[in-house]
């Protein structure tokens, strides 16, 4: 009887230890995702500031934001570079 209770206690303890380890792993993953999200938000804020600074007309700003939303950061940066090149040619 004592042996059966000891085995049950060990199994419960093992299950609890395993659950605690999984919780710690999930917390670590959540922390990584939160940092990645903060980095992403910061990049987007910087890019939006660049859009406001580089684009001369509201149409350019809208176009840049559309590109950012639908095609992503790299395409938006490429568009902004093309706007800068065009501005240099025009001046």
Image (cartoon, rainbow, N blue to C red):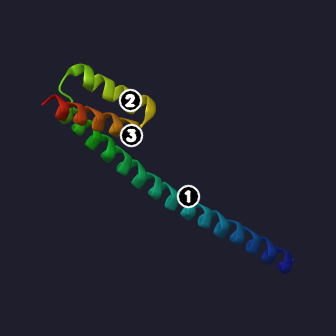
Q: Quadrant of residue 45?
A: top left
**Regarding mark 3 in the picture, which secondary structure is present there?**
helix
Structural crowding at the residue carrying mark 3, measured as other residues with C-alpha within 10 Å and reported as few (<14), some (14–19) or many (≥20): some
Q: Which residue is mark 3?
A: 73
Q: Position of residue 80 (x, y in %)?
A: 29, 35
Give the quarter of the image for residue 57. Answer: top left
Question: Disc 1 on helix, strand or loop?
Answer: helix
52 relative to 5, above or below: above
Q: Position of residue 32 (x, y in %)?
A: 46, 58
Q: Of callouts 2 and 3, which one flags the residue occurring earlier in the amino acid sequence?
A: 2
Q: Quadrant of the C terminus?
A: top left
**Residue at image location 26% in from the left, 43% down from the top:** 46
State the residue position of label 2.
67
Badge nearest the viewer, 3 or 1: 3
Q: Residues within 10 Å of mark 1 (few under 14, many from 20)?
A: few
Instruction: Classify residue 88 by image quadrant.
Output: top left
Q: In the rendered structure, are the residues bearing label 3 and label 1 in contact, judged by CB atoms less than 8 Å apart?
A: no
> Which one is earlier in the sequence, the residue at label 3 or at label 1?
1
What residue is rendered at 60% in x and 65% in y? 20
Left or right, 1 with respect to 47, comes to right
Query: Does label 2 or label 1 sit earlier along the sequence?
Result: 1
Looking at the image, is 3 positioned above or below residue 17? below
Q: Nearer the viewer, residue 38 or 58?
A: 58
Q: Residue at x 40, y 55 (%)?
A: 35
| For the residues bearing labels 2 and 3, Cβ distance under 8 angstroms | no
Q: Which mark is residue 26?
A: 1
Residues under labels 2 and 3: Cα distance?
8 Å
Where is residue 60? Give x, y as percent: 26, 24
Residue 79 placement, left or right of 12: left
Q: CA distance from mark 3 to mark 1?
A: 29 Å
Secondary element at image label 2:
helix
Residue 42 vs 16, above or below: the answer is above
């Amino acid at each position: 009887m004592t042996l059966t209770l000891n085995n049950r206690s060990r199994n419960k303890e093992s299950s609890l230890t395993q659950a605690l380890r999984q919780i710690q792993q999930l917390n670590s993953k959540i922390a990584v995702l939160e940092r990645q999200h903060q980095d992403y938000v910061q990049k987007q804020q910087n890019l939006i500031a660049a859009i406001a600074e580089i684009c001369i007309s509201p149409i350019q700003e809208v176009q840049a934001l559309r590109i950012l939303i639908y095609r992503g950061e790299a395409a938006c940066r490429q568009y902004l570079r093309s706007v800068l090149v065009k501005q240099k040619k025009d001046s």
